[in-house]
Amino acid sequence: MDTLPPDNLFAADDLQHMPLAARMRPRTLEEFVGQEHLVGPRALLRRALDSDAPPSMIFVGPAGSGKSTLATIIAGMTRHHFEPLSAVTSGVSDIRKAAAAAEERRRLHSRRTLVFLDEIHRLNKAQQDSLLPFVERGTFTLIGATTENPFFSLTMPLRSRCRLYQLKPLSAEQVLGLLQRALADGERGLGTVAVEVAPEALAHLSEGCNGDARTALSALEMAVLTAQPGEQGVRHVSLSAAEEALQQPVLKYDRAGDEHYDTISAVIKAMRGSDPDAAIYWLAKMLEAGEDPRFIARRIVIQAAEDVGLADPTALRVAIAAADAVEYVGLPEAQIPLAMATIHLATAPKSNSAYLAIAQAREDVAKEGAARVPDHLAGSARLDKSSQPYLYPHDYPGGWVAQDYLPPGLSGRRYYNPKDNRREQLIAEHLEALRAQREGRSVEARPPVQASPAAAPETPPTTTAGTRDEQGEHTEDSSE
C-alpha cells in the first residue's frame, strides 16, 4: 500500500524553517527506525495497517521513541484525514468539534478521520470520558500518545476501548543510524553542509541521548551550525563540541509516572538488601529530580518497621526523626537526615517478623471471621459472663501467669516468629521459657532485651529477602 504523508504536514516551503529533528521525521514505515515488535512485517499492528483497519490505540513510550511520528505515518498509510490535537491546549469542545467534522467528512467524502491526541494523560477524567462515544461508534480513530503509565493516568473505560502499544527507547545503534542519515540527506538533513563529525562525537550523541532521537538530532544540528568552518570551508565537530551541544542529559523522571515508583522501589530494595551505596544513589536521583522529600521520608518510615523491625527498633526512631527533620528544616539541608536514615536502614540487621505477624493475623481474621473476645478478657460487663476470672499478671511472681489470650479454638496459634538476629533470638529464648513454664517444663526465663544501640550486632548479619508483594510498594502512594 502506498504511504502518503498527512495533509500539508511536510510542505516544501516550511522545511527550511523546521528544526533538523522535524525535517528528518520519517514519512514511511521504511524510514521508521525501531519498534519492530509493532510495525515489523509479521506484527499484528502492521497487519492491521496493511488491511486498512487501524484500531483506536494508545502509544506508550519515552520521549523521542517515535509516538507522534508513527501516528502520522499511520494516517498516511490508511489515507485517513489527520487531525492532530494536544491535550495541553485542547478540551471537550475541541474533541466535539473534531468529531462533528469527522462525521461530516465521512458523510460527504467517504473519508475517515484519525484524531491524534498528544499528551493524552493530561486530560482529566471528564475530558477522557468525552472521547468514549466517538471511539465506541467509530466516529474517528483515536491515537493517543503518553509518556506515563496508562494504568495510572488513563481511565479504565478509555483503556478498554483502545489497544495499548508500548514503544521502547531507541538503541544507541539505531540513533547512530539516524544521525548518519541526517548527515547524508541533502534534501531534509545536513547533506549540503560541508561537515566532518568525529566518530567519537557521534558515539557520544547516540549514547548520551538515552534513546531520544529528537534530543540527539537537535544536539547534532547545534554542534554543526555552531562549528566554525576551517580553511577549506569544512566544519569539524569534535567530541567536546558534541558534549557541549548535548549538555547534561535530561533526567528522565516523572513524579506521577513510572520513574517515581520504579526509583523509590529501587531505594527500598537496596535498603532491604543492605547496600547503602545503591540506596544513596537512588535517593540522590529522586532528590535531584525534585521528588517530594515527604514522600521519601514516609517510605523510609515504612521500611524501618517492615524490613528492619524488631532486629533494630531504633531504626524506626531514626526514620521518624528524619521525617520530622524534613518538615523542620526542608531542602536542601533535609537531604542529610534522609541520607542518614537511608544508610542506617541499609546497614541495620533485617527482620520482617512484625510485617509477617500482622499480615498473617489479618488474613486469618478475614478468612475465619473476627472471633468474640473471651469473657475474662472483655472490657465490659456481660450478662452471660462465665465464672473464669481474669488473672492480673502483676499479682504473680515475675509479672507473668499462665492464661489464654486467644479465642477458644485458636489457642497455641503463633503469628510472631522471631528471626535469626541477635536481638530477636533473645526474645525467642524469653518466649520459649514462658511457654515451657505454661507447659510445666523447666526452662530458665530471660527478660527480653530493651531497644538500644548496644543490642545491634557488631557485624551486619546475612540478610534474607522479604516476602512482601512488591506491587504493593508500587501503588502505596499512587494518589499523591
Image: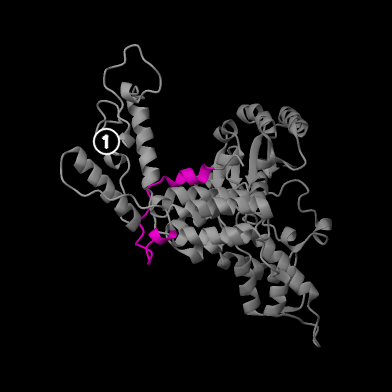
| Horizontal and vertical percent position of residue 144 | 64, 42
Residue at image position (34%, 26%) is 377
Q: Quadrant of the C terminus?
A: top right
Q: Quadrant of residue 165?
A: top right
- Amino acid type for the residue under numbered disc 1: Val
Question: Is label 1 in a helix, a strand or a loop?
Answer: loop
Q: Residue furthest bottom?
A: 231
Left or right of 426: which side holds 311?
A: right
Answer above or below: position of 256 versus 280. above
Task: Tell me, yes or no, whether the highlighted magenta stretch contains residue 462.
Answer: yes
Q: Is residue 132 visible?
A: yes
Residue at image position (57%, 45%) is 149
Left or right of 310: which side holds 299?
A: right
Residue at image position (26%, 18%) is 387
Q: Residues within 10 Å of mark 1 (few under 14, many from 20)?
A: some
| Horizontal and vertical percent position of residue 192 | 77, 72
The residue nearer to you, when weighing 401 against 271, is: 401
Left or right of 1: which side holds 231?
A: right
Q: Which residue is mark 1?
A: 401
Q: Is residue 254 visible?
A: no
The residue nearer to you, when weighing 385 against 256, is: 385
| Horizontal and vertical percent position of residue 361 | 35, 35
Left or right of 421: which side holds 199?
A: right
| Horizontal and vertical percent position of residue 447 | 31, 49
Residue at image position (36%, 47%) is 353
Answer above or below: position of 475 versus 69. above
Q: Residue furthest top?
A: 383
Number of labelled discs?
A: 1
Question: Of helix, strand and loop, which mostly describes the magenta segment?
Answer: loop
Answer above or below: position of 432 versus 232. above
Instruction: Please provide the residue range marked out in magenta.
Output: 453-476
The residue nearer to you, when weighing 351 against 228, is: 351
